[in-house]
Image (cartoon, grey):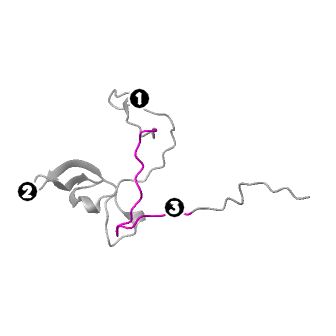
Amino acid sequence: MIEEPSKKRVYWPLGKVISLLPGRDGKVRTLKLKCKNSELIRPIQRVYPLEVPFINNEIVKIDGVPTSSVNEDKLTSNAVIKNKVTRSGRLVKIPERLGLFNESFICF
């Protein structure tokens, strides 16, 4: 979807990326897009991926890479647990709950 500030998002045109255009420093900041009737050059900030709901729950192998080779983060007994810190540098204290709803009360 190609952003046009004068139109609502529903009416933004669809386009397909033809090529990436690198800048002087080698970083890609602009794209060449193919629309229905024309080709456009737009900055990356003005191009958005089309939001399509994912229905298929099957895992598909991409480029022959088995799914088991994907790194998974698993906690082990040797894992180091870091304290959470805010942007200002303060430690985040996790609140201690009373747990009243987890216990069953016996009334006579």
Magenta segment:
77-95
Does the magenta portion include 94? yes
Which one is closest to the eye, mark 3 or mark 2? 3
User: Which one is earlier in the sequence, the residue at label 3 or at label 2?
Assistant: 2
The residue nearer to you, when weighing 48 against 99, is 99
Residue drawn at point x = 9 percent, y = 55 percent: 25
Q: From mark 1 to mark 3, how far is it between C-alphas? A: 34 Å
Residue drawn at point x = 34 percent, y = 26 percent: 64
User: Which one is earlier in the sequence, the residue at label 1 or at label 3?
Assistant: 1
Asked whether the residues under the numbered discs 1 and 3 touch, taking CB atoms below 8 Å apart as contact, a structural biologist would say: no
Q: Which residue is mark 2?
A: 24
**Which percent across, then down, holds residue 23?**
11, 56
Q: Residue furthest left?
A: 24
Q: Quadrant of the N terminus?
A: bottom left
> 8 above or below 84?
below
Task: Classify 10 Å Cα crowding around label 2: few (below 14), some (14-19), many (20 and above).
Answer: few
Residue type of the residue flagged with mark 2: Arg
User: Regarding mark 2 in the picture, which secondary structure is present there?
Assistant: loop
Which one is closest to the eye, mark 1 or mark 3? 3
Q: From mark 3 to mark 2, how far is it between C-alphas? A: 48 Å
* Residue 108 occupies quadrant: bottom right
User: Which one is earlier in the sequence, the residue at label 1 or at label 2?
Assistant: 2
Q: Which residue is mark 1?
A: 68
Residue type of the residue flagged with mark 3: Ile
Q: Which residue is mark 3?
A: 94
* Residue 88 occupies quadrant: bottom left
